[in-house]
């Protein structure tokens, strides 16, 4: 098989940033073969109310008019059931939970879920989605670190699901066999996103390699195998969420590397190449296009195109420039995932 034709993909977890970086990243969404995406709210300041979400959406739509942007709010103590109902009426699709301090712009994240149960109840009633960054903060006294923070979180996922069985919950960017097993064990209202890079990386690939460093970190080969196997299985509650999270190269390469991997411009070439490497190319459309749309009950999408991928050996670009040339704000470069490394598939056309 030398060509593949599939619908444009659904990226159900993406970071589109702000300012000059946003102006580079957002138009790259359709270039990667994606026509709908679920946008993360961890900006500065965080997207914490309906007006902020709608203003951000308008900025994104001006940069990529054909793309459908599903917006989210940042779970915070000021978020009320009344604001949830207002947001739902305005078309905001969900709420993202960040445990305090575990990733980019999560300093105002949460420490306890119980106080948010009234918010979760309103979300359940309004049909909104709860997106969980599934880690707990590192704690040396409790032997918790980046390698087991996800597994230690999974009890919270189960508790929230049992308390609100009709609330759609997504465990975001799963990295462990334990996470896969937990999501499988729960009801049909619990889904899970898997990134491009976690299908490729293990711990050895990011230790000392700043451009592969992300949160949650890639884990053991057995964990990667579990992610790959659930895709080979074609499980409909596991779907694409790239967690593409660009940072300027100088912030990745400094003494305190920012967490994030950038995949947006090449989502489908990456996926076709990686899925083929473990015998799952036939699952590309389900995982990348169908399952996420179904879980989110997508309606009235602006545009769904047809992407033609062709078998071709070529190398990932070394960097993507942003800013400059009359654009206000910061300028620099972003190094993409697998920079300079070979890919086996390329987008020939999007119609």
Image (cartoon, rainbow, N blue to C red):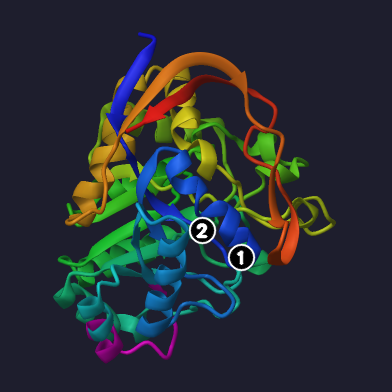
Considering every residue shown, the one lying at the far right of the view is: 255
Horizontally, residue 333 falls left or right of residue 27, namely right
Boundaries of the magenta span: 73-85
Tag 2's secondary structure?
Answer: loop
Number of numbered callouts drawn: 2
The image shows residue 148, relative to residue 224, as above or below, that is: below
- Asked where in the image residue 91 lies, by quadrant, the reply is bottom left
- 10 Å crowding of disc 2: few (<14), some (14-19), many (20+): many
Q: Residue at x 70, y 28 (%)?
A: 340
Considering every residue shown, the one lying at the far front of the view is: 326
**Viewer-proximal residue, 2 or 135?**
2
Q: Residue at x 57, y 59 (%)?
A: 23
Q: Which residue is mark 1?
A: 104
The answer to whether residue 171 is seen in the rendering is yes
Residue 315: x and y in percent read 64, 23
Q: Is residue 254 magenta?
A: no
Q: Residue at x 59, y 48 (%)?
A: 217
Q: Are marks 2 and 1 in contact (CB under 8 Å)?
A: yes
The image shows residue 206, relative to residue 12, as above or below, that is: above
Residue 282: x and y in percent read 30, 21
The image shows residue 289, relative to residue 250, as above or below, that is: above
Res 15 label: 2
Q: Is residue 74 magenta?
A: yes
Tag 1's secondary structure?
Answer: loop
Whole-Å distance between the Cαs marked 2 and 1? 10 Å
- 10 Å crowding of disc 1: few (<14), some (14-19), many (20+): some
Residue 195: x and y in percent read 46, 43
**Viewer-proximal residue, 133 or 298?**
298
């Amino acid at each position: 098989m030398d060509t593949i034709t599939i619908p444009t993909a659904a990226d159900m977890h993406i970071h589109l940033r702000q300012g000059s970086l946003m102006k580079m990243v957002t138009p790259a969404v359709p270039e990667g073969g994606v026509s709908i995406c679920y946008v993360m709210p961890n900006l500065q300041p965080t997207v914490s109310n309906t007006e902020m979400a709608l203003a951000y959406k308008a900025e994104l739509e001006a940069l990529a008019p054909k793309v459908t942007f599903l917006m989210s709010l940042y779970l915070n103590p000021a978020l009320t059931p009344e604001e949830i109902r207002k947001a739902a009426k305005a078309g905001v699709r969900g709420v993202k939970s960040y445990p305090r301090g575990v990733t980019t712009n999560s300093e105002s994240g949460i420490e306890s879920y119980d106080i948010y149960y009234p918010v979760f109840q309103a979300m359940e009633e309004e049909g909104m989605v709860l997106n969980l960054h599934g880690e707990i903060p590192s704690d040396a006294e409790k032997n918790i670190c980046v390698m087991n923070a996800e597994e230690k979180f999974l009890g919270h996922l189960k508790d929230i699901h049992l308390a609100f069985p009709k609330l759609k919950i997504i465990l975001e960017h799963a990295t462990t066999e334990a996470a896969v097993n937990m999501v499988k064990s729960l009801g049909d209202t619990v889904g899970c996103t898997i990134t491009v890079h976690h299908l490729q990386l293990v711990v050895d690939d990011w230790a000392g390699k700043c451009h592969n460093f992300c949160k949650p970190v890639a884990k053991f080969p057995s964990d990667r195998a579990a992610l790959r196997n659930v895709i080979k299985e074609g499980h409909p509650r596991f779907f694409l969420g790239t967690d593409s999270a660009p940072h300027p190269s100088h912030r990745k390469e400094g003494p305190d590397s920012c967490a994030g991997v950038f995949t947006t411009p090449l989502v489908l070439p990456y996926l076709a190449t990686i899925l083929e490497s473990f015998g799952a190319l036939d699952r590309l459309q389900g995982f990348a296009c169908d399952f996420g749309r179904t879980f989110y009950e997508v309606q009235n999408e602006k545009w769904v195109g047809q992407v033609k991928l062709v078998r071709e050996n070529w190398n990932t670009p070394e960097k993507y420039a942003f800013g400059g040339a009359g654009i206000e704000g910061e300028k620099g470069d972003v190094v993409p995932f697998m920079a300079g490394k070979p890919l086996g598939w390329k987008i020939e056309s999007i119609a």
